[in-house]
Image (cartoon, grey):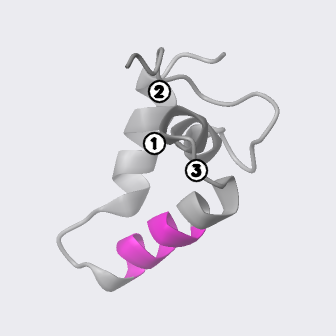
Amino acid sequence: MSRGTLTRSTSDRMVAGVCGGLADYFDLDPTLVRAGYVLLSLLSVGFPGLIVYIVLALVMPER
């Protein structure tokens, strides 16, 4: 089963479209992906959420 390519969302974006693109890729609700990403970033000291988001925004192509 092919999922396609991982791209940033142009229609479902709040900042750069990274969470919207991840939600499209994994066929999940974008709000749940955003909430999970924020919780993971805030609760985990070893997960540098802001840095990962910036890297993904730079690396992921726009749809």
Task: Check if mark 2's residue and mark 1's residue have beta carbons within 8 Å.
Answer: yes
Residue 28 image point, x, y percent: 58, 50
Q: How many marks?
A: 3
Q: Quarter-wise, where is residue 44 in the image?
A: bottom left
Q: Residue at x 57, y 71 (%)?
A: 35
Q: Is residue 11 above or below residue 44?
A: above
Label 1, label 3: how many angstroms apart (C-alpha)?
Answer: 21 Å
Residue at 25%, 65% (x, y): give it: 47
Q: In screen coordinates, is 5 left or right of 14?
A: left
The residue positioned 68% from the left and 31% from the top of the image is 9
Mark 1 neighbour density, 10 Å: few (under 14) some (14–19) many (20 or more)? few
Q: Looking at numbered disc 2 in the image, what kind of residue is underneath it?
A: Leu
Q: Position of residue 59 (x, y in %)?
A: 41, 23
Task: Evaluate if marks 1 and 3 touch, with contact meaning CB atoms under 8 Å apart.
Answer: no
Residue 54: image tag: 1
Q: Secondary structure at mark 1?
A: helix
Look at mark 3 in the image and give the residue it sits on: 28
Q: Which residue bears the numbered disc 2?
A: 58
Report how far apart the C-alphas of labels 2 and 1 lie in the structure: 6 Å
- Left or right: where 11 falls relative to 60: right
Residues rendered magenta in the picture: 35-42
Q: Nearer the viewer, mark 3 or mark 2?
A: 3
Q: Amino acid at mark 3?
A: Leu
In-front residue for pair 14/25: 25
Report x, y in % for residue 15: 70, 47
Q: Secondary structure at mark 3?
A: loop
- For the residue pair 9 and 52, the one nearer the viewer reads as 9
Reply yes or no: does residue 33 show up in magenta. Answer: no
